[in-house]
């Protein structure tokens, strides 16, 4: 019999989630750089620019002032009011600040939202390809993520037909939609979003709208789910448009009956969201002019890639509507995107993320490029890829 001390340490089954492969690409890129070789980074989905100067100044002032204590679990009241005002300013919709929940990034928002909405065993639809942590957070919480294949036929958008067909055969409790989306960079038109929300509500399906890439829209303006329903759950973040990934701060707009359950969850799981980040985030709204300049940089990068990548050999990619991603079909060159990304990194010095991170099957034919870096980097990347593929 095994002595207790000899028993191998067994982590829980629920903690057995797959890794995020982009992290492995980052590690491989770092090894190449340690050898003194140059790598153009297009793998990680984060802005190269810092947080708005207004946010940094507010954080400095708060630090100088000294005490950084807990806040109310739902967030500092003035911050919640400021976020509500953002909806009036950007979308022209009025929401009661009491429906705003401040979260530790949108990642913290998903955990809270899934806990408040779903029971273990509940089935929740997610688009495939999609952001991997949706699936992995749901699995960890005992729910079942149900992938719905999206494709070029519907401009890579989830449709009412696909959603209701799935629900008819095997009912789902929720659906999660992102526009602009990661990894595809595609967006839903306002009426498509509205139709999905109305169809979900007619079928008793909870609708969660990931709006983290709002503000980064180039083809047309992104629409918020708040406009169409007070039952939808909107998840958003300061990470992308406001360049505040490391501050770990986001928010949700939730239906009124969920406010108190979410408050109790947040009280127990985290007490409150980091105070310094809440202070900085409120001031970030005053830094929009600076962030618009950063956005213009992404627009320039997008133009460079859309024009030059086809000439370099990668001429098949999805509509580049928003966020800072381009999802390129590399099936002319490889049926193993992980291998392709590894070779492109080693031989061309360009780091990008294999599509298998986002779609285990069709992702074998795709690579995701993030264009949140400098325009000089984009030109260099295209030039390197062109030389490599020739
Ligand atoms: C689609 C999408 N949602 C959510 C997140 C999580 O972001 P955060 O927790 O920093 O707000 C990301 C991060 O890349 C993302 O791409």
Image (spheres, grey):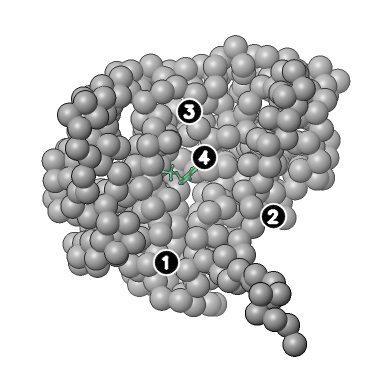
What element does badge 2 sit on? loop
Q: CA distance from mark 3 to mark 1?
A: 30 Å
Give left or right: position of 383 versus 103.
right
Q: CA distance from mark 2 to mark 3?
A: 26 Å
Q: Between disc 3 and disc 1, whose residue precedes?
A: 3
Question: Which label sits in the foreground, 4 or 2?
Answer: 2
The percent position of residue 36, horizontal first and vertical second, equals 75, 18
Residue occupying image coordinates x 34% and y 61%: 269
Residue occupying image coordinates x 40% and y 59%: 111
Q: Nearer the viewer, residue 140 or 178?
A: 140
Q: Is residue 197 visible?
A: no
Q: Which residue is mark 4?
A: 186
Q: Which residue is mark 1?
A: 174
Q: Which residue is mark 3?
A: 47
* Label 2 Cα crowd, 10 Å radius (few <14 / some 14-19 / many 20+): few
Q: Nearer the viewer, residue 313 or 73?
A: 73
Asked if the residue at tag 4 contacts the one at tag 3, i.e. Cβ–Cβ closer than 8 Å, the answer is no
Q: Which residue is mark 2?
A: 360
Q: CA distance from mark 3 to mark 4?
A: 18 Å
- In the picture, the disc for residue 154 is none
- Residue 164 sits above or below residue 321 on the image: below
Q: Nearer the viewer, residue 213 or 269?
A: 269
Q: Is residue 249 visible?
A: yes
Give left or right: position of 144 versus 67.
right
């Amino acid at each position: 019999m095994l002595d207790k001390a000899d028993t191998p340490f067994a982590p829980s089954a629920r903690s057995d989630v797959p890794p995020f492969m982009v992290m492995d690409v980052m590690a491989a890129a770092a090894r190449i750089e340690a050898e003194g070789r140059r790598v153009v980074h297009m793998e990680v989905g984060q802005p190269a620019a810092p947080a708005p100067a207004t946010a940094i100044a507010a954080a400095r002032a708060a630090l100088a002032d000294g005490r950084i204590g807990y806040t109310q679990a739902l967030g500092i009241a003035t911050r919640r009011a400021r976020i509500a005002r953002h909806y009036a300013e950007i979308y022209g919709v009025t929401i009661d600040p009491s429906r705003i929940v401040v979260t530790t990034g949108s990642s913290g928002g998903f955990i809270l939202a899934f806990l408040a909405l779903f029971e273990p065993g509940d089935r929740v639809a997610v688009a495939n390809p999609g952001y991997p942590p949706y699936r992995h957070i749901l699995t960890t919480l005992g729910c079942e993520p149900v992938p719905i294949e999206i494709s070029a036929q519907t401009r890579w958008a989830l449709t009412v037909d696909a959603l209701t067909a799935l629900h008819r055969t095997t009912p789902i409790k929720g659906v999660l939609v992102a526009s602009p989306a990661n990894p595809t960079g595609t967006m839903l038109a306002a009426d498509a979003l509205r139709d999905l929300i109305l169809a979900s509500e007619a079928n008793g399906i909870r609708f969660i709208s990931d709006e983290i890439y709002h503000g980064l829209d180039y083809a047309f303006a992104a629409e918020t789910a708040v406009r169409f329903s007070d039952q939808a759950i909107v998840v958003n973040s300061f990470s992308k448009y406001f360049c505040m990934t490391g501050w770990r701060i986001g928010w949700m707009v939730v239906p009124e009956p969920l406010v108190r359950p979410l408050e109790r969850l947040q009280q127990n799981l985290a007490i409150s969201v980091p105070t310094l980040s809440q202070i900085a985030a409120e001031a970030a709204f005053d830094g929009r002019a600076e962030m618009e300049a950063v956005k213009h940089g992404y627009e320039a990068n997008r133009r460079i890639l859309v024009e030059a990548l086809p000439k370099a050999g990668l001429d098949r990619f999805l509509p580049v509507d928003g966020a800072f991603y381009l999802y390129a079909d590399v099936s002319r060159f490889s049926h193993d995107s992980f291998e392709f990304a590894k070779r492109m990194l080693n031989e061309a010095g360009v780091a990008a993320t294999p599509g298998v991170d986002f779609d285990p099957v069709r992702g074998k034919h795709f690579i995701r490029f993030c264009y949140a870096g400098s325009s000089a980097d984009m030109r260099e990347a295209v030039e390197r890829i062109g030389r490599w593929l020739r």
